[in-house]
Image (tube, helix red, strand yellow):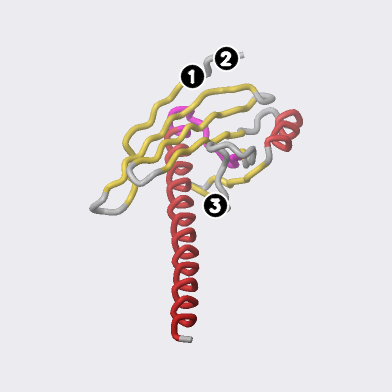
Amino acid sequence: MFRLFLFNLIVLHSACAQTNKSHTNKLVLSNIYIQAIADFIKVANKKNTTIFDTLFIANRKMDQPEDFPDIDLPEKIENTQIVLITPKLAEISQKSRKSRIYINIMGWVDREKAEFIFVVFSNGFDHQYDYNINYKYNMKSEVFELENVQFNESPFGKK
């Protein structure tokens, strides 16, 4: 009887530990995505001398490693409204209002670093430019710190 009790206690403890770990991982992932989006908005606004009022972010789910993760984002980041949108709705939205900014974010996060590529579309779904944003994890302060930001013109040129 004691063995059965002990077994159930171990199983329950393992399940709870896994739940807490996945919740923590989701929170850490949410925070680094929020930080990356905030840094993107600040740098892009400065470089483009344009202030974003709304960013439409691709909520891709294609079973690929670079799919947008299942995380919680605030409604606003850096005073910019954030809207997650499917690629299909983004295409329809771009056709109806070409001035909308649509962002495809690909991110790779591990214990030591976080890397993001922001692919920016506008003008009827034309690829405008990219930003690569990289972070390094600081073990002492236990936060990701901005390492560098790189702007890349569209490889297809401006239309």
- The picture places residue 69, in percent across and down from the top left corner, at 55, 46
Q: Tag 3 or tag 1, which sits nearer the N-term?
A: 3
**Residue at figure coordinates x 49%, y 55% from the top left:** 26
Q: Nearer the viewer, residue 142 or 125?
A: 142
- The picture places residue 70, in percent across and down from the top left corner, at 57, 50
Q: Disc 1 marks which amino acid?
A: Glu
- Name the image quarter holding residue 115: top left
- Name the image quarter holding residue 114: top left
Mark carried by residue 133: none
Q: Residue furthest left?
A: 140
Q: Nearer the viewer, residue 117 or 13?
A: 13
- The picture places residue 131, in percent across and down from the top left corner, at 46, 29
Tell me the distance, in whole angstroms, between the alpha carbons under discs 1 and 3.
Answer: 29 Å
> Closer to the camera: disc 3 or disc 2?
3
**Residue at figure coordinates x 46%, y 37% from the top left:** 40
Judged from the image, the secondary structure of the residue bearing numbered disc 2 is: loop
State the residue position of label 2.
158
Q: Tag 2 or tag 3, which sits nearer the N-term?
A: 3
State the residue position of label 1.
153
- The picture places residue 120, in percent across and down from the top left corner, at 56, 29
